[in-house]
Image: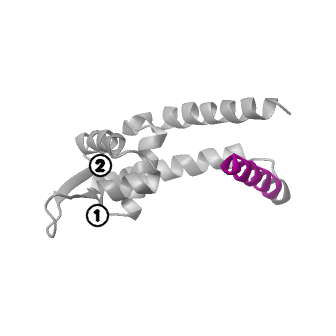
Amino acid sequence: MKNIGMYLRNITQAEYHKVDKRLEKYNLVKGQASLLSLIKKNDGATQNELAALLNVKYSSMSERLYKLEIMGYIRKAIDEENQKYKRIFITTEGKKAVIQCNRILNEFEESLYKGFTKKEMKQLEDSLEKMMRNIEKM
């Protein structure tokens, strides 16, 4: 039973390693690909709004966005109504990268869950949700 935590950590580390390897050609890592996808879904959001959606600090979001901007995947524009805010927009190149990144992530997930029945997947999901609720109660 105590090995479950070890397995979860190892799976997460292996996932990041394998996915990052596939994302190399876009100069992205998994976290950046996920952020880019979030920006596409929330095109025009502020840095604060994106930070809140990911539950990260404003300063962490600033660094992440800077890297995506340098790569040409996003652009920032000053909010016309309140000039102290910058809106974040995905570029055409960013949209192309999201499509490819989502394909890579979907292929990885299909491989990861290969051989599981729907019932097994539901049981696993229920167990992990129960673990999360237990953690939240601590």
Give the residue displayed 79% in from the left and 58% down from the top: 122
Residue 123 marker: none
**Which residue is most to the front?**
138
In percent of width and height, residue 130 lies at 76, 53
The amino acid on which the numbered mark 2 sits, given as a three-letter code, is Tyr
Above or below, 21 against 31 in this view is: above
Location of the N terminus by quadrant is: top right
Bounds of the magenta segment: 122-138
Q: Nearer the viewer, residue 34 or 2?
A: 2
**Mark 1 touches mark 2? (CB < 8 Å):** no
Give the residue displayed 38% in from the left and 44% down from the top: 57
Question: How was this image coloured?
Answer: one colour
The amino acid on which the numbered mark 1 sits, given as a three-letter code, is Gly
Residue 73 marker: 2
- Pointer 1 residue: 44
Left or right of 124? Residue 69 is left
Residue 133 colored magenta? Answer: yes
Is the stretch drawn in magenta largely helix, strand or loop?
A: helix
